[in-house]
């Protein structure tokens, strides 16, 4: 039991509020983030690259999109071939930024978040997986999937 | 299941801690237990089952050599273990009640090396340690993992379970989310298995080498962009123990072949 408690203390200590929230509560409306994270204009074609590339979002690890020229697309997450019909740009944005805001137990990683993470690899500390503009490019690309 | 995921997630966020207080959520029912073998392609399965093709047997053979012939003045392992070590690997990691020490198979082998052979311990992932561990574990091939958890051992099991259930890394994922909640699904070219250690040391095509269970754990941690723990870290030992209790009854498959 002593060990268990020690582990817990460790977890608490490392889950500090030191890291800022990249998206403030006022930007969240229901299950969406209606406004873009970046002023720069989003480009869907770039979003497609982010979706496929290992160095980008590598979303194909878990999701498939029909007709995408990537082999072995994953199915841990839902098929996104028609996700633009189901979800608005604001809803897509929130799900990419930090789906855990609305579904805390979700497997979907939070791509634009640096707070409340634990044991993050040294080279990844204090940086989100994707930049604001990469998220916007993805939103543009996925909005067109309909 | 979805509902449970949601509820436990709430607990996690609220307390900013692991989900370890949810009883038995990581345990897979006996009738559903499946070795990583069943998630391999037929080709990789064949590579494992054909002892002449299975590349891991190179290490098993080298291990047999090391076991029977001492390369220095110290007595060979075989001089004490005349009848071999059949069944031993099925009970590892093992907790020694007297010393309060938790040892995996590698640790036990190194203990013999230092205490009975007067030699320096072999390093993790050294050819020698991998070979002899594979050789010893292979003698339990086909035998069910058999770990009995005593009261004194329970804290170590809990610690391993805690690690299994804790989300970590930039991807913020736990072992549980992949290996209990999503086994059988595709993570690109990989079919996620139930995450059992019954095949280790195993030959991984990606490594082009045989590797320890801890090397596999480091790969999974690195995969979610978490800082992996050092080899031999007590927490990884506890995780190994937890995995073994979680896989109780599953047959030892060492030396397995994996993608």
Image (spheres, coloured by chain):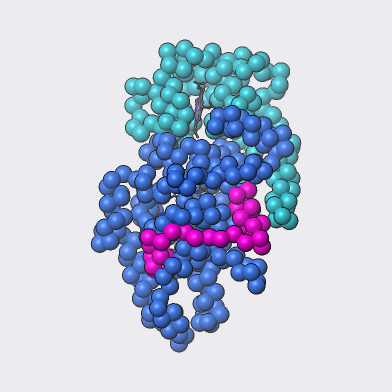
Chain colours: A cyan, B blue
Residue A141 position within the rendered picture, expressed as x and y whole percent measured from the top left: 46, 18
Q: Residue at x 53, y 70 (%)?
A: B108
B257 relative to B46 in the view: left or right: right
B162 relative to B120 in the view: left or right: right
Q: Residue at x 66, y 60 (%)?
A: B151
Q: Residue at x 50, y 44 (%)?
A: B28
Which image quarter: residue A14? top right
Residue A43 position within the rendered picture, expressed as x and y whole percent measured from the top left: 48, 17
Q: Nearer the viewer, residue B54 or A115?
A: B54
Specify the quadrant that holds the N terminus of chain B.
Answer: top right
Let me know if residue B76 is in the magenta part.
no
Q: Is residue A39 above or below residue A121?
A: above
Q: Is residue B73 above or below residue A115?
A: below
Q: Is residue A101 visible?
A: yes
Q: Nearer the viewer, residue B139 or B224?
A: B139
Number of dots carrying numbers: 0
Q: Residue at x 61, y 14 (%)?
A: A34
Which image quarter: residue B96? bottom right
Q: Is residue B197 above or below residue B83?
A: above
Q: Nearer the viewer, residue B142 or B183?
A: B142
Q: Where does the magenta region start and end?
A: B135-162
Residue B216 position within the rendered picture, expressed as x and y whole percent measured from the top left: 47, 52
Q: Is residue B242 above or below residue A53?
A: below
Which image quarter: residue B61? bottom left
Q: Is residue B223 visible?
A: no
Residue at the extreme front of the image, as rendered: B31
Residue B115 position within the rendered picture, expressed as x and y whole percent measured from the top left: 56, 80
């Amino acid at each position: 039991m002593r060990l268990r408690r020690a582990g817990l203390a460790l977890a608490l200590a490392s889950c500090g509020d030191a890291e800022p929230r990249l998206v403030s509560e006022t930007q969240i409306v229901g299950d969406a983030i209606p406004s873009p994270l970046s002023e720069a204009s989003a480009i869907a074609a770039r979003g497609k690259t982010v979706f496929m590339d290992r160095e980008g979002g590598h979303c194909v690890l878990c999701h498939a999109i029909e007709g995408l020229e990537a082999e072995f697309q994953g199915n841990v997450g839902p098929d996104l071939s028609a996700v633009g019909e189901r979800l608005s740009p604001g809803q897509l944005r929130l799900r990419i930024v930090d789906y855990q805001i609305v579904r805390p137990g979700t497997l979907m990683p939070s791509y634009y978040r640096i707070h409340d993470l634990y044991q993050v690899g040294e080279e990844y500390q204090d940086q989100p997986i994707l930049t604001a503009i990469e998220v916007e490019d993805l939103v543009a690309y996925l909005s067109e999937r309909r | 299941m979805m509902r449970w995921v949601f509820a436990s997630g709430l607990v996690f966020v609220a307390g900013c801690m692991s989900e370890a207080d949810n009883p038995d959520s990581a345990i897979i029912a006996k009738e559903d237990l499946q070795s990583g073998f069943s998630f391999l392609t037929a080709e990789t399965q064949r590579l494992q089952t054909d002892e002449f093709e299975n590349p891991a047997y190179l290490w098993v053979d080298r291990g047999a050599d090391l076991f029977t012939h001492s390369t220095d003045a110290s007595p060979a392992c075989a001089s004490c273990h005349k009848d071999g070590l059949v069944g031993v690997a099925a009970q590892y990691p093992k907790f020694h009640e007297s010393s309060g020490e938790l040892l995996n198979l590698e640790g036990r082998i190194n203990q013999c090396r230092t205490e009975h052979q007067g030699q320096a311990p072999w390093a993790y992932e050294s050819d020698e340690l991998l070979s002899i561990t594979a050789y010893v574990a292979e003698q339990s091939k086909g035998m069910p993992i058999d770990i009995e958890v005593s009261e004194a051992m329970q804290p170590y099991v809990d610690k391993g379970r805690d690690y299994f259930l804790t989300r970590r890394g930039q991807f913020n994922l736990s072992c549980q989310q992949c290996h209990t909640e999503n086994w059988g699904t595709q993570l690109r070219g990989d079919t996620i298995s139930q995450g059992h250690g019954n095949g280790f040391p195993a030959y991984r095509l990606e490594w082009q080498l045989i590797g320890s269970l801890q090397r596999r754990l480091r790969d999974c941690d690195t995969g979610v962009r978490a800082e992996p723990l050092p080899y031999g870290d007590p927490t990884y030992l506890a995780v190994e123990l937890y995995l073994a209790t979680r896989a109780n009854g599953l047959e030892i498959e060492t030396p397995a072949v994996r993608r």
